[in-house]
Image (cartoon, rainbow, N blue to C red):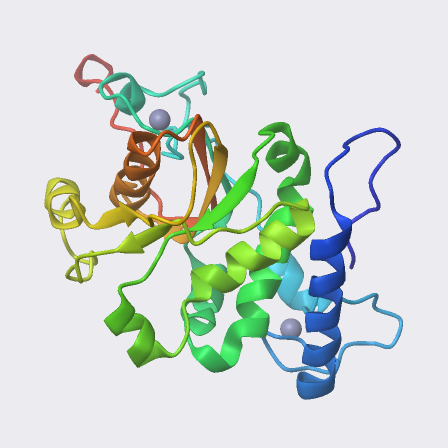
Amino acid sequence: MIAPKDKQGEEERPRKPTKRLSAIGLQLADLVFGRRCAMCSVDLPETQVLPLRLCHGCESQLCLPLPPLCPKCGSRYPQGQTPAEDCSRCRKRKLPFREMVCLGMYDGKLREAILKAKHARNQPLAAALAELLYNKRREKLLSLECDLVVPIPMHWRRRWLRGVNHTETQAAELGARLGLPVKHALRRVIATEPQGGLSASARRKNIRGAFRKRFRFKVKDARILLVDDIVTTGATCTEAARSLRRAGAASVDIAVISRADRPIPVPRNRL
Ligand SMILES: [Zn+2]
Ligand SMILES: [Zn+2]
């Protein structure tokens, strides 16, 4: 399935150069990988319009309906609680980003796809997930009116060991689909411990000071779309957004493939 063509007068962004580059990349990928589903490797039907490299079965399992989430931090509202502009968790702190747009919850098939997309050989899948995010959340992403796309960087040592930063692949795909430039404006100056298994406060401490703005990129007054593959407590994207805001960015929004389930605590008097 291909994203619908722009509706008349809906946007006036310069899309052609990035789209052309993306098309060349996809044609090359076509030659190398053939017309196969990037997730399950089943042959795609000749009638399926590329570039989306997912079979219908995988696509539907990767796009399950989202529960009600806080539009700002992506925390899940408990059953029976009405979603508001921002949640009780957001009201307690000042976040350096405006909104978080996500494809789905970090669970089931999407979790499996995200783990698979981290490997260098599975970059067509990493790109397919970003394209799915664009296809399903297009209106929201366009309404943010961002100027440029920035991926969450990986420390150079980890990138060297992995051979790829899958988040860069996803940022490139999103940038191409949105017609926005992609700038690797941040670098990771501290090789942080993996965040898995740490508490929210330990994650914030672990990631503090981990990002620096690259000198050669200007972000002053820019509206930035920061791309990551998974948000758990939000500590990483909060720290990265803070670095961009300190460097003068006008605003930061987060585009993320998946959100780990993090229910908003129910107030004590409701228990
Ligand atoms: Zn498939
Ligand atoms: Zn919130």
Would residue 234 be found to the left or right of residue 189 on screen? right
Residue depicted at x 65% and y 58%: 60
The residue under the point 73% across, 55% down is 17
Viewer-nearest residue: 108 or 41: 41
Q: Is residue 198 left or right of residue 179?
A: left
Q: In this orientation, does residue 131 appear?
A: yes
| Whether residue 126 is situated above or below residue 14 in the rendered picture | below
Where in the image, quadrant-wise, is ligand 1 located? bottom right
In the picture, measured across the screen, residue 113 lies left or right of residue 33, that is: left
Q: Quadrant of residue 77?
A: top left
- Give the vertical position of 239 relative to 62 (above or below): above
Q: Is residue 257 visible?
A: no
**Residue found 58% across the figure and 29% down from its top:** 144
Measuring from the top left, give residue 165's x and y in whole percent.
41, 67
User: Extreme front residue here?
Assistant: 216
Q: Looking at the picture, tell me which residue is in the foreground, 170 or 215.
A: 215
Q: Position of residue 107 (x, y in %)?
A: 42, 57
Residue 251 found in image quarter: top left
